[in-house]
């Protein structure tokens, strides 16, 4: 297992997480190869976001192992994780933009933290990152003055400005209208093609999954219920998966 | 039915355990901050912004507190001393009290209220909106970015704020005693200068420095452990002010006893 894990960009072995008495994850095994986009689907509360946070060491598992480019990160101290995290970007569900900073300051943040001090280089790279997410001209706005879709784009620009090897997306289209969702889906795909970024996308949006996924994993009650291609998921006769795809709750009026 | 003493001992035991747990939390933060100071460069731009926020903008509240405390203290001391014809000693009493106790404690309480609450609310909001996790995901330790600049800023600002509070309190007390109560200024100033010495300034600055550090760690700890939602941030803010204020009052007693060994009171 370790040999395979070492060949993958990301690898998770027997991951479990219990919070209080609630078992959130029940032994998840997954691998993400370099350059591919894995979409993790599942209903709200199925443990998708918790799983994603384990991939970057923001949460500590109850048991199991997580490998980033072959390096086991479970058990590392916070300060040991910091340089590893710089190779992986994460786009949070609520965007998590620094609300005291302008758009340009938010996007420039990782560069400044990496030690870049030349204002011209910072300005050029911020302009390039904002251009790649179609957000040129909004540099001086504060996050509070941005729409939901614009916030997602700024969050993505902040992630990609340092050209990470891998990006984790937590519900990238949640709360957005269909048109803006579509543009975010295109952006994710564009990032993958343009920079060859490995991506893990957590979502419950089937349209998003269909647009960006190379592979799909369906998480149900803290375990991988299905793992395969998107077309295989859609064609699956499994009633649980079909209910999810069709959005059927099983409740009657 | 459980006997009363068992309930009492259980209550005392659980309270002590909670206190030890809390002190352990604070100690972790202190150690992590010490580690950061050794391993990570200080972000001076953030320190400067915090000095403006916690130092410069706290001046009005500290000056008003110091001025009216000095005034009321001078008046009360005069009312008591006047009956013994000792009103010329008012200056010495006000000065030594402001330096040794009132200045640092009142400044500490005001800063715990104004600055401690703001720190907890800001960091707590960052925690519940995942901005703290965003920092971590970008390879930045929250202690390096959020705690260290605030601590350095308050280490610089707090002694200055305390000195301001003491100075304005003494000046205001002198105004009340001399210009409103009619105490002879030359005797007032003479006794004040006779009984006040450098050791009093050293005590006030030391206390201010220690209280500043206490306020930062208590406030940042409450902010960083905020639970989800607005209620969690509100709770963290309240806890920060309550714990910060109580800690200052309690620590002040021990500091007074210890510092009096190094800087003994009296001529």
Image (tube, rainbow, N blue to C red):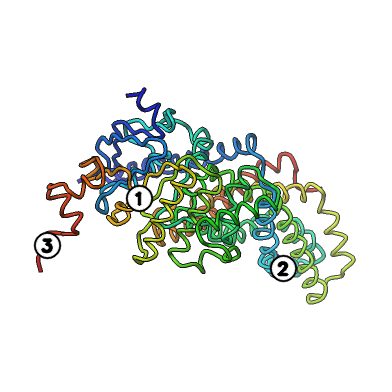
Labels 1 and 3 positioned on one and the same chain: yes
Report the quarter where the N terminus of chain A lies.
top left
In this view of the protein, which residue sits in the foreground, B200 or A20?
A20
**Residue at the extreme bottom of the image, as rendered:** B180
Q: Position of residue A218 (x, y in %)?
A: 24, 45
Q: Are marks 1 and 3 in contact (CB under 8 Å)?
A: no
**Residue under label 1:** A212
- Residue A114 on image: x %, y %: 61, 42
Q: In x, y percent, where is residue A61? A: 35, 36
Q: Is residue A222 left or right of residue A194?
A: left
- The outermost residue toward the front is A193
- The residue located at (27%, 40%) in the rendering is A25
Q: Which residue is mark 2?
A: B67
Q: Which mark is residue A251?
A: 3
Between A166 and B26, the one lying in front of the other is A166
Q: Chain of mark 1?
A: A
User: Which residue is at the front of the view, B157 or A9?
Assistant: A9
């Amino acid at each position: 297992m370790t040999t395979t894990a070492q060949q993958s960009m990301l690898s998770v072995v027997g991951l479990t997480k219990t919070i209080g008495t609630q078992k959130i994850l029940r032994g998840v095994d997954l691998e993400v190869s370099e350059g591919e986009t894995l979409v993790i689907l599942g209903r709200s509360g199925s443990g998708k976001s918790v799983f994603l946070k384990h991939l970057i060491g923001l949460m500590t598992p109850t048991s199991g192992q997580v490998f980033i480019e072959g390096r086991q990160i479970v058990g590392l101290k916070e300060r040991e994780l910091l340089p590893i995290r710089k190779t992986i970007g994460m786009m949070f569900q609520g965007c998590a933009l620094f609300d005291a900073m302008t758009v340009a300051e938010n996007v420039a943040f990782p560069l400044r933290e990496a030690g870049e001090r030349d204002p011209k280089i910072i300005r050029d790279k911020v302009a390039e990152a904002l251009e790649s997410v179609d957000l040129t001209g909004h540099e001086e706005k504060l996050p509070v003055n941005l729409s939901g879709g614009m916030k997602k784009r700024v969050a993505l620009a902040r992630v990609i400005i340092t050209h990470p090897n891998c990006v984790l997306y937590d519900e990238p289209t949640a709360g957005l209208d269909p048109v803006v969702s579509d543009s975010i889906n295109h952006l994710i795909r564009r990032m993958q093609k343009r920079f060859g970024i490995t991506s893990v996308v957590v979502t419950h949006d089937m349209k998003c999954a269909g647009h960006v996924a190379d592979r799909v994993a369906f998480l149900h009650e803290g375990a991988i219920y299905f793992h395969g291609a998107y077309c295989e998921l859609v064609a699956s006769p499994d009633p649980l998966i079909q209910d999810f795809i069709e959005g059927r709750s099983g409740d009657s009026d | 039915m459980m006997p009363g003493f068992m309930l009492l001992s259980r209550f005392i035991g659980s309270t002590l355990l909670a206190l030890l747990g809390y002190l352990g939390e604070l100690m972790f933060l202190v150690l992590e901050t010490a580690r950061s100071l050794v391993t990570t460069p200080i972000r001076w731009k953030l320190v400067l912004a915090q000095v403006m926020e916690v130092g410069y903008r706290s001046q009005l509240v500290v000056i008003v507190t110091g001025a009216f405390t000095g005034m009321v203290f001078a008046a009360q001391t005069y009312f008591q001393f006047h009956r013994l014809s000792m009103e010329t000693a008012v200056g010495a009493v006000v000065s030594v009290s402001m330096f040794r106790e009132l200045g640092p404690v009142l400044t500490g309480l005001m800063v715990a209220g104004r600055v401690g609450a703001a720190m907890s609310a800001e960091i707590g909001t960052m925690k519940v909106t995942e901005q703290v996790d965003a920092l971590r995901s970008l390879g930045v330790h929250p202690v390096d970015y959020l705690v260290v600049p605030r601590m350095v800023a308050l280490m610089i600002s707090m002694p200055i704020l305390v000195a301001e509070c003491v100075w304005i309190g003494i000046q205001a007390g002198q105004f009340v005693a001399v210009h409103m109560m009619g105490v002879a200024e030359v005797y007032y100033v003479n006794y004040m200068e006779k009984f006040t010495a450098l050791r009093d300034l050293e005590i006030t600055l030391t206390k201010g420095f220690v209280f500043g550090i206490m306020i930062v760690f208590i406030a940042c700890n409450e902010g960083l452990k905020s639970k989800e939602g607005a209620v969690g941030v509100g709770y963290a803010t309240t806890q920060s002010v309550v714990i910060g204020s109580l800690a200052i009052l309690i620590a002040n007693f021990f500091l007074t006893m210890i510092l009096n060994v190094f800087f003994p009171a009296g001529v």
